[in-house]
Amino acid sequence: MSASKKYTILTPEEAAELIPNGSTIGFSGFTSAGSAKVVPRALAEKAKALHSENKEFKVRVFAGASTSSSIDGALAEADAVSLRLGYQSTKIMRDKINNDTIDFIDIHLSHIQQQVRNGVFGKMNFAVIEATEITDDGKVYFSTSIGASPTYLDCADKIIIEINRYHSLRLREMTDIFSIPRPPHSVTIPIFHPLDKIGKPYSLIDPNKVAGIVYNDEPDETSSFTESNETCAKISSNVVNFILNELKKGHIPKEFLPIQSGVGNIGNAVMKGIGEHPDIPRFNMYTEVFQDSLVEQLEKGNILGASTTALTVSSENLKRIYSNMDFFAPLLRLRPQEISNSPIVARHLGVIAINTALEADIYGNINSSHVCGTKLMNGIGGSGDFERNGHLTIFVCPSIAKGGKISTIVPMCTHVDSSEHSVQVLITEQGTTDLRGLPPHKRAKAIINKCVHPSYRDYLHKYLESTPKGHIRHNLSTCFELHRNLMEYGAMLPDVRV
């Protein structure tokens, strides 16, 4: 690819020098897919050098969701971040957030673009965006994720483009950029099928805002998920059996509905189970992340197509896609996250939403984000965009963690991200609880009997029996006893041996 004559070619270090202390930066990346790489690493090195001279240097980091070690890892390690907006999943970033050395704003991923456009977070000084190409007239073609990048390009005072020559130029055949005008001029999103194309394959920017372009040829820093274990397999089987029963009852139409699935090992196992079951109709996906298990299911024809905002697949699977773009390109749509995660589209498409809980309580409230209610894990992510608006909302989790020291189902969630009013079905490896149509006390008994690990059932039954009568029954003196035990003794029930 020849260098553009219109834009200044920069080294990563030269690009980093353009960014002053206190800047707000919108980085590309939704997961590690499409994350900017060489400029944030150079920015981290700049921060270290300035700190060694007792000079201050920190920036505010915005992205689509979690990113890669080149952004969240490198910048956090260099003490170069004052604030992080949105979902994150990097240990060093997480630790510094929980130590109060980095401010963090947890936010529904479908809300980020509108709030940035509205100026809620102040001025965006720079956008650092990975692309496969930028044309002289300002067309930016993205790499493996879209995320919030179109909005960051629109709102930033200055733009630095990382041209990544590793990625296929044919990614633009999947890309569908559609921007929603600010209210009261907002428009209907005309998506009536997950594969509908409604926009353009690029974002158009003012070329005069481009401070320079930086070249690299690095793959995404996406790792493979671990192989499904017995617990994941049992959860997957329970999800499949529940869906089959819903089909039999006519609660899901015979032509089936699009599926949204959260990212991770459980999500991979669940989608593999659904895709390979012969009695589940072939289906489309309307989701936020396209991950490893879906590649094979698409090739087999079990999945008919997928709308997403990121190709979060291993290097091996990305090469597999690139080597057969004639097949994959027509079956995948890469959209901005305010479209991929749109609650409105999820509602009118009738999405089946399947997400993973960190913790659930006996009434069906879900904690997706905070350990013991205080320590951030990753964030709410996109689960809230789908759970309230799905045709069917399912949360999955193992019944225990840390070898049985933790019950993931507790009397009361220490933090609530998805409330009992939105959660319809809870599934663990122990079983399935359909919460629809059940009053609170019957929900509690059903969850304890069907979803809780046997080691914790007696405790939770006794807890429920100890509660005073009320519409929702809680014993406020003991509702967090399991969490207090965990913090004091290292196990929720110290005498339990699983």
Image (tube, rainbow, N blue to C red):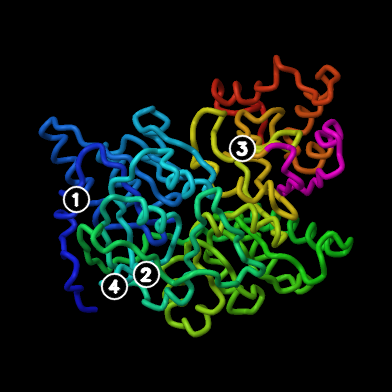
**Is 439 in the magenta?**
yes
Q: Residue 16 has which mark?
A: 1
Quadrant of the frame with the N terminus: bottom left
Give the residue pinned by disc 4: 135
How dense is the environment of label 4, judged by Cα within 10 Å: few (below 14), some, or many (20 and up)?
A: some
**CA distance for labels 1 and 3:** 37 Å
Find residue 383 and report its horizontal and vertical position in percent.
60, 48
**CA distance for labels 1 and 4:** 23 Å
- Tell me the magenta residue range: 419-445
10, above or below 494, in the image: below
Q: Earlier in the sequence, mark 4 or mark 2?
A: 4
**CA distance for labels 4 and 3:** 42 Å
Nearer to us in this view, 192 or 314: 192
Quadrant of the frame with the C terminus: top right
Q: Earlier in the sequence, mark 2 or mark 3?
A: 2
Q: Residue 141 has which mark?
A: 2
**CA distance for labels 4 and 2:** 9 Å
Find residue 404 and report its horizontal and vertical position in percent.
63, 37
**CA distance for labels 1 and 2:** 22 Å
Q: Residue 417 has which mark?
A: 3
